[in-house]
Structures are given as C-alpha cells and as structure tokens.
Image (cartoon, rainbow, N blue to C red):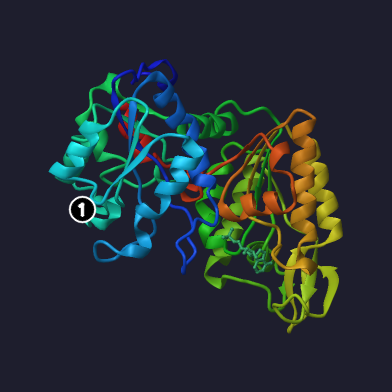
Amino acid sequence: MTPFSTYDFKDRKAIVRVDFNVPLSKETFKITDDKRMQAALPTINKIISDGGSVILLSHLGRPKNGPENAFSLKHLCEHLSIISGAKVFFSPDCIGSQTEQAAKNLKGGEILLVENVRFYKEETKGDISFAQKLAKLGDCFVNDAFGTAHRAHSSTTQIAASFDNKDKMCGLLMDAEIESAKKVMEQTKRPFTAIVGGAKVSDKVLIVENLMKKADHIIIGGGMAYTFKKALGGNIGNSLCEDERIETCKTILENAAKKGVQIHLPIDSVIADTFSATAQTSIVNSADINEGWMGLDIGPKASKEFTAVIKASKTILWNGPMGVFEMGPFESGTKAIADAVANATQSGAYSLIGGGDSAAAAKKFGVVDRISHVSTGGGALLEYFEGKVLPGIAAIYQ
Ligand code: AMP
C-alpha cells in the first residue's frame, strides 16, 4: 500500500470509491445535504491536480430491483461539476464496454461518475466477478468511503484484490477517519471518557462492552439509561426499557466495577406525560419516575455531574444523544454535553463525535468547529469501536 499523499496520479486513471449516498428531495431530486460529496473533494482534487483522471464509484440509497430513477447518481452530476470545478461525465452503467470506453476517453483533470453500483445485486453480495468488471475501469484504486467500510461489498472490498499493493490505497477522508479513531482507541490520553446515548441498549451493548477495555469513565444517557436504572431496581415509569436486556445491563455494571471503570448514569431526568414537545414536564430522580411519565432528557444534576467528568478528560468519544434533543423541552442535556465536549477540546482534550444523531446534535448546538473530529461514519464507526475489523479497510492493507 502506497500512502495516498505520495502517489503520483499523473496520467493515471484512479477508481475512487466514495460515499455519495446523499439525501435527495423526493420531487425534484435536488441534493438537500452535500456534506458527503464535500468530504470527498480533497481526495478528488489531489488526483486532478496531479494530472490524473477520476472514475467515481458509489451507491445511493437501497434500490431493490435494478435501476430506479430515484436512486440514480445522474442527479449528482451537475452539483459535482460545480463543487469540483472539473469536467464531469456520467455513465448510465457502472460496468461494461461503454463504461470502459468512457473511462478510457477521460483526459487528465476530468471525472467520470458511473451509475449506482447497487443497481447490480452482485454489489451487496460481494461478487468477485462483478468487482473485477469494476476494476477494469482504471489502473489504481482509492477507497475513500469510510461510511461503507464495514460492508464487504464488491466496490468497497473485493475490488481491491484486482490491484497490486502499490496501486491501492485509502483516500484522505478515509485516512482522517482511521487516524481519528486510532487516536481514541490506540493513542489514548487519559482520562478517557466515552459518552454513549440514544434510544436503545441493544444497539450499544457491544460498543459499551468493548469500550470497557479502554475507558476510564463511561457516561450513559438517553433512552438507553432507563434499562440500566431498572436493572438497579429503580422505578422508571413509562420510560424506554428493553426488559430482555436487564441482565446484560447488570453484567455490564458488575464488569465495570471489577475493572475499575466508572459508569455514570443520570441521577435525575426531565420527565414528560406524553412523547411530545407540548407535554407536561417535571424534573425528578431518575429512579423515581411514576407510571404514566417517561424520562426524555437527563436532568440538571446529571448534566452538572457529566460536565465535570468531561471537563477532566483528555480523550472523549461521544455517540448518541442524552435525550430527545429534536424537541425543545428535552434538548438541554444534549446541549450541555455538546458544550462540555467543545470546552474540554479547547482545553486540550481530543474529541471524536460519531453516529448520525450525535453529529446532528453537534451541528444543532453549533459546536462542530470546536470538536477535534466529527466522523462521517455511523455504522462503520460503531463497528470499529465494537472492536470489529472493517473489511473495506482490511482489503487495502492485504
Ligand atoms: P440512536 O439512533 O440509538 O442514537 O438514537 C437516537 C434517538 O434517540 C434520537 O432520535 C433521540 O430522540 C432518541 N432518544 C434519546 N433519548 C431518548 C429518551 N430518553 N427517550 C426516547 N428517545 C430518546
């Protein structure tokens, strides 16, 4: 594997797997958030400025049965040419002789965006011969799609086998994501605090168990905190609860105690009588919630305690909101955590925020610029922190 930054792309045709899975408006197919396209620009620009040409592979949405207009990458062409400043061609297929010819015709500095790789069912099956057909489009391969690095699909994983080690590499976005995740898990400055929130315990069990090997403190908020509270014998009223996970929560708490990892659960909560922004609310002890009421945010005492832990930390990982931050009455806890993480970062801590909802919260509360790294990867980042190997990255290093 050659480092991307030292590879000379002059007169090379670089196949770049990007994650252009952007949201499109249903009526006009206009891009409503181009964050993922912007994130791939540094990689595309480096290849172009070296004098190479770029063949872009991506998926868009989850097409079920072959080509579907709603999932066509042709809707992205115009915007791509605006933001890259390059001449962009579109191929209505991603493999085959016509696509190969279009790739061959590219001159240095030009881009060919090929149609959605998921229009072929072979893609998600990780079909090798489909990967080999994709590989014919260029003479080197760059994987810059961190968001799909946890998928062993043809265009993210199997394709790499068609290239010599010196001609396959991770792009700049992928490198930045890996470096950031390693700073948290491998070059950890202590104390290391992991903040885990969101709706369900079941989604986060593996991550909490794996983080226990590394973290000094684990803060648990959001809906998932109430299953832990119930496991400790608390009354949680109508708060979110996964009864089948109560034993898991007890085991996590026992293991944390044995390992000396401090688990912080919210001592108080903002409760509501309905799941609504206009509900009646009150602040109570989180283990003392009456029937008919549900905890929808951490309370002020919990915010204060969590803020103090975060302030004293040198490495911070945040995945999952502390409450239903989308509704005004239940946003305070998540906002307090966002501010605390940003302030700790300004005082020298390394912070990584990942997972769609926490990234959305960081944006809502205006702290993105004061965080060390906000990841583009939801599932991929979670799997990394669960301790799993990401096949898209492993394929480059094989
Ligand atoms: P996740 O995708 O698991 O990270 O969950 C994110 C969602 O959890 C957000 O949409 C929040 O509104 C929701 N959430 C956070 N706290 C609570 C809570 N206490 N009760 C219900 N939903 C919650």
Q: Nearer the viewer, residue 147 or 383?
A: 147
Which quadrant: the C terminus?
top left
Q: Give the residue pinned by disc 1.
A: 122
Q: Residues within 10 Å of mark 1 (few under 14, many from 20)?
A: some
Q: Amino acid at mark 1?
A: Glu
Frontmost residue, 375 versus 391: 375
Q: Is residue 125 left or right of residue 347?
A: left
Q: Is residue 272 above or below residue 320?
A: below
Note whether residue 286 is visible.
Answer: no
What residue lies at 60% left-to-right and 59% top-to-bottom?
250
- Position of residue 160 measured from the top left corner of the image (x, y, whole percent): 26, 33
* Left or right of 360 on screen, residue 367: right
Q: At x 35% / y 53%, what residue is drawn?
A: 74
Looking at the rendering, which quadrant does residue 242 occupy?
bottom right
Which residue is pictured at 64% across the width and 54% down the height?
A: 360
The residue tagged with tag 1: helix, strand or loop?
helix
Residue 155, horizontal then vertical, whole percent: 28, 43
Residue appearing at x 25%, y 66% in the figure = 65
Q: Is residue 97 above or below residue 361?
A: above
- Look at the image and tell me whether residue 206 can be seen: yes
Ligand 1 lies under 8 Å from the Cβ of mark 1: no
Q: Is residue 128 left or right of residue 391?
A: left
Q: Quadrant of residue 352?
A: top right
